[in-house]
Amino acid sequence: MEVSPNYCFYRMWVFKFLLLPMLSFALNPEEMLDTQWELWKKTHRKQYNSKTSEEVVQKMTGLKLPPSHSHSNDTLYIPEWEGRAPDSIDYRKKGYGDCGSCWAFSSAGALEGQLKKKTGKLLTLSPQNLVDCVSENYGCGGGYMTTAFRYVQTNGGIDSEDAYPYVGQVQSCMYNPTAKAAKCRGYREIPVGNEKALKRAVARVGPISVSIDASLPSFQFYSRGVYYDENCDPDNVNHAVLVVGYGVQKGNKHWIIKNSWGESWGNKGYVLLARNRNNACGITSLASFPKM
């Protein structure tokens, strides 16, 4: 195959302006991220350095709303808790490749949180079950979390990861009722733009499925600290993640977010996203959680 000079120049530009700044940034890493950064370099040089931001969004995000989606007062989350929410919450106790299944990982993670709260056991549920079986979504082509919650509710359950392992591509639905590990009885949605309601939900309910704008290189190459980019668009959410807590770091309020790009991304798979910064990256634009 003949490679044109323009193509080579384009890829060299990607390397120079996306990867090299991160390598320079790594010359003075925080001590807690030294080992993680070395792993990031080994993994991401191969995985991401030759991809543009648009290619990362196309291959590694997957939020897609069904045509009929709309917020309903019946599913709107209105906090009944009048007490003050704790100053910090952290539920972190626990790479989906080129399949746009972020919505399935976010949904399964929220269900796992509710299952842990209800039974005291942390069991990994099957994102693949959702990818294969939620007909209203688009498999590896994207989907939405409330649609997944509704599927689990009407289907009568979701299998465990052990019984229905992840393969990163769409298969025929192979849900096995005898391997059912959790059920769902509905869902609630956080009011758009209401970070106070999201904070109360995280404190009272547990991990919350949310959607964010993951299209910027600054997010794709995040490694430490509290992430904030004024260009991160709350009206352009394209990636589903899971809020597993919140807190304050060096005076900066943040959400603790679990991504699904593998532990070599970010800070062991997590990012601290600015909190109370006008719905940064759309953190409350499409936030929801299952009822169990």
Image (cartoon, helix red, strand yellow):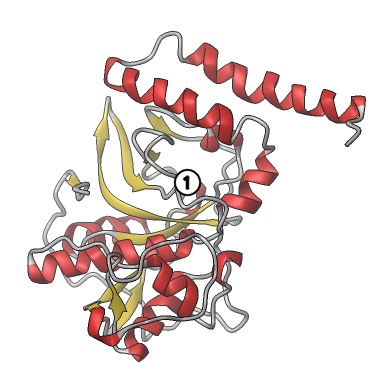
Q: What percent of the width, then of the height, locates residue 52?
A: 69, 37
Q: Residue at x 50, y 61 (%)?
A: 101
**Is 34 above or below relative to 287?**
above
Q: Which quadrant is the N terminus positioned in?
A: top right
**Is 10 above or below relative to 270?**
above
Query: Is the residue marked by circle 1 packed among few (<14), some (14-19), or many (20+) residues within 10 Å?
Result: many
Nearest the eye: 232 or 12: 12
Quarter residue 53 falls in: top right
Is 80 placed left or right of 153 in the picture? left
Amino acid at pointer 1: Ala
Q: What percent of the width, then of the height, locates residue 271?
A: 38, 39
Most extreme residue toward the top is 27
Nearest the eye: 39 or 109: 39
Q: Residue at x 20, y 68 (%)?
A: 114
Quarter residue 141 falls in: bottom right
Nearest the eye: 53 or 173: 173
Nearest the eye: 51 or 198: 51
**Circle 1 residue:** 280
**Is 240 above or below relative to 271?**
below
Q: Residue at x 25, y 35 (%)?
A: 248
Q: Which quadrant is the C terminus positioned in?
A: bottom left
Q: Residue at x 54, y 82 (%)?
A: 136
**Is 271 above or below relative to 195?**
above
Q: What percent of the width, then of the height, locates residue 160?
A: 27, 70
Q: What percent of the width, then of the height, locates residue 191?
A: 40, 68
